[in-house]
Amino acid sequence: MPERIPRHITLQRYEEFAQGFCECCEKTLTKYKRGRHHGKGSWEAHHAFPDRPITIKNIRIMCAHGRNCHFYCGHDGDWYNIGIWPRFCRRI
Ligand SMILES: [Zn+2]
Ligand SMILES: [Zn+2]
């Protein structure tokens, strides 16, 4: 299932790395739309390297709306799959 990543780490990653764009497909995100139920611009933090602890280095900000990176790229289309960081975006 989706990871529980502390809010402060999530927002720090968004500010310092993602800066308003999905880190996988580079789609534009909307800062206040954290979570997957806010329509276009929704985004979530993803624990990209589950064998490493949840730190700002080991998470990624990913789009979470429609055919989205968090589900298709981060979890290969099944929330029960362990999280990965794909070499290529699989969304398109
Ligand atoms: Zn994306
Ligand atoms: Zn992607």
Image: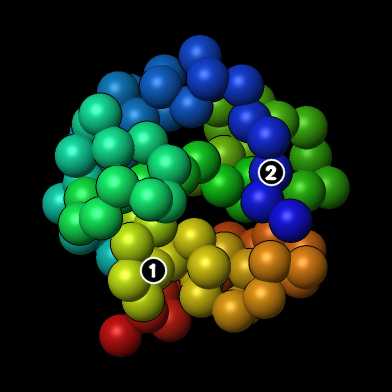
Position of 59 relative to 65 (above/below): above
Residue type marked 2: Glu
Label at residue 68: 1
Compared with 44, 62 (above or below) is below
16 relative to 28 in the view: left or right: right
- Quadrant location of the N terminus in the rendered image: bottom right
- Residue 24 visible, this orientation: no
Give the number of the disc on residue 55: none
Callout 2: CB less than 8 Å from ligand 1: no
Residue placed most toward the observer, 53 or 80: 80
Tag 2 residue: 3
x and y percent of residue 89 in the render? 40, 75
Classify the position of the C terminus by image quarter.
bottom left
Q: Nearer the viewer, residue 28 or 58?
A: 28
**Residue 90, above or below 49:** below
Is ligand 1 closer than 8 angstroms to the Cβ of mark 1? yes
Kind of residue sitting beneath label 1: Asn
